[in-house]
Amino acid sequence: MPGRRVSHPLFARVFERASVAMDRAGGARHRHRLVTGLHGLVVEVGAGNGRNFAHYPQTVTRVLAVEPEARLRAAAREAAAGAPVPVTVTDGLAEALPLADGVADALVASLVLCSVADQAGALSEAYRVVRPGGQLRFFEHVRSRSSGLRRVQRVVDATCWPLLCGGCHTGRDTLTAIGDAGFVVTELDRFRFPPSTVAGPAAPHVLGTALRP
């Protein structure tokens, strides 16, 4: 796993524009909720273009932001320069974090567990680097609870969606994977995003907190 190159230049360009539109549609409020109350050393995996950075509270002493895609990593470094807390952006994978065991007070996963190559491996790494009593904060789109939409998710995940969307999968059972990694979910909000009358395959979202016992 270490050394695996991640390059999605076309998707990165699309994502940079889409993330701005997403925040205007309410995503910024969800990002703010995601990191509210954090403190100490925070690791953010799949930091993208750094849209979360502006929302970190000043109780956070440092953010180590890991982003493997070169174009997004460069954008994240620009965003880090204006962040209200110290942010270091580094190359790396969620499945192989450059940290010792139990050093982080929290790990933030924001719209990334859908696209990591090895979701179980990424969550195992999160569990490894978060101290006992520390938190996993997550904001992810997940497998639908509707059987009809789950069928749609299976179809798009088996055909075009991962290729077009940088390896993203719409139907991953991320909540179960979080529990399987050893975390205990203590807060959970389910919602559709963006809000619309017709749910797309990536519409079911969760935002919450899980603790490392």
Image (spheres, grey):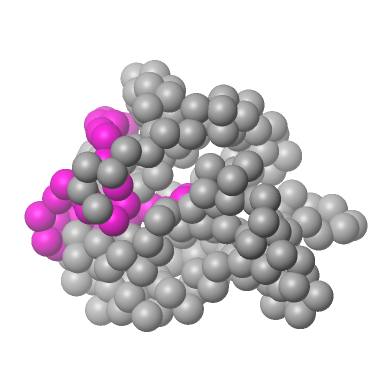
In the rendered image, residue 93 lying in the magenta stretch gets the answer yes
In the shown orientation, is residue 101 left or right of residue 127? left
Q: Which portion, as a residue range, is magenta?
A: 85-112
Q: Mainly helix, strand or loop, the magenta region?
A: loop
Q: Residue 70: which quarter of the image?
A: top left
Residue 2 in the magenta stretch? The answer is: no
Q: Residue at x 31, y 65 (%)?
A: 121
> Is any part of residue 94 visible from this angle?
yes
Q: Residue at x 69, y 32 (%)?
A: 21
The relative height of residue 30 versus residue 209 in the rendered view (above or below) is: above
Q: Quadrant of the C terminus?
A: bottom left
Q: Is residue 212 left or right of residue 157?
A: left
The image quarter containing residue 151 is bottom right
Q: Nearer the viewer, residue 27 or 122?
A: 122
Furthest residue toward left: 100
Along the viewing direction, whichever of 126 and 173 lies nearer the viewer: 173
The percent coordinates of residue 105 (x first, y second) are 23, 57
Q: Residue at x 40, y 56 (%)?
A: 117
Relative image position of residue 207 (x, y in whole percent): 55, 61
Residue that sits furthest to the front in the current view: 159
Compared with 146, 23 (above or below) is: above
Q: With respect to residue 35, does 210 lie above or below?
A: below
Q: Position of residue 168 (x, y in %)?
A: 55, 52
Residue at position x 73%, y 39% in the image:
25
